[in-house]
Amino acid sequence: MKQLKLMAMALVAALAFTACDNDDPEEPIIDPVIYPDMLVLNNGNWGANDANVLAHFSEDDGFVANIFAEVNGRQMGDLGQDMVVVGDEIYVAMNGSQVIYVTDKLMQVKHEIVATAGDMKLSPRYFCVAGDKVYVTYYEGFLGEINTKDYTVRTTAVGNSPEGLAYVGGKVFVANSGGALYPNYENTISVVDAAKFVEEEKIEVNLNPQMIVASTDGTKLYVNSFGDYAAVPAMLQTVSVASYKVSDLQYTDVKGICAGPADVLYVVTGSYNDQWQVTGTVNVYDTKAGADKGALFAEPVANYYSVSYSNGCVFVGASDYKTNGDVYVYDTKGQLLKHFDSQGLNPIKGVKL
């Protein structure tokens, strides 16, 4: 079976020796490891220990469901929140299990990072990468900095329930949602000096900020806030990195953003129905021109759940919160490359290796 072959390759390269007539061994034949070309992280359900990663292999257009469990012989745990590629390693934030896995590209665990504040374990949310540092938000109100050389972590306090973050010009900008304090959402972005690793100040934005994306030239931040799901609407705003001036962009019902290729921001818009489901449209915003370029593709996505971009591929996850999700993979021209069952609940992040 393909799975058994892949797992065997991952754990040890197979060496085949043959003997000549004089019993001298020939050079060993090394069977190379085959790595996936796409990974999809499934968030799972709170407390269900059912987060997993689906791997796609371009060699034969095949999939391995729950590759983490196949390789490591155990489940990932609770609530896979984010996944990022750093060189030859993959970092996975497990929010419910309060651990960050560092794996190889076959999801074999190399290291586990657990951060604490006093006696309290911290719950990782989202990543951003700058040089040899990985920055991570912790839901208990902290920003973490991971040294990728030795996996050590230092933390500093920010606002309540931080979510997305971005690194620009020696500073880390952190969206403080206040979500754990519902209905008292926050409306601030913490500005953290990356060298001193202390919060310098806070910038006021719309209520309940979630994700932050920096423009390619580093002059602006794009902030997606969810509002209060009632009187205060979801918005997309820009923040000047130089002056911290905040301006509104003319999008309504913004449900998600992610950085695309150079000077492209993907903006998902759509309204909730009475079942709290969204039919999402993925819009293309040109950050250099400051202009909307229309929808990436014509047909909106039912049960929209997530959007992410990696190496020329736009991953859109769909979920009904009850059954396996769907993953749609598009190129940057809006052509559908693949549509497949995520083999898990709530596909939240895709990466192209």
Image: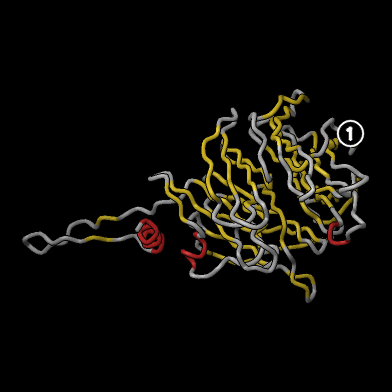
Q: Residue furthest left?
A: 21
| Residue 147 seen from this side | no
Tell me the SS state at disc 1: strand
Picture quadrant where residue 248 is located: top right
Closest to the observer: 155 or 224? 224
- Residue type, numbered disc 1: Ser
Residue bearing mark 1? 247
Q: Residue at x 78, y 73 (%)?
A: 120
Q: Residue at x 90, y 49 (%)?
A: 187
Image x and y of residue 170, in percent? 77, 45
Closest to the observer: 17 or 237? 237
Closest to the observer: 159 or 299? 299
Q: Which residue lies furthest to the bottom in this view?
A: 119
Image x and y of residue 224, in percent? 80, 42
Picture quadrant where residue 279 is located: top right
Q: Which residue is drawn at 85% across and 35% down?
A: 240
| Residue 81 seen from this side | yes
Q: In this view, does 55 lie to the left or right of 259?
A: left
Image x and y of residue 296, in percent? 65, 30
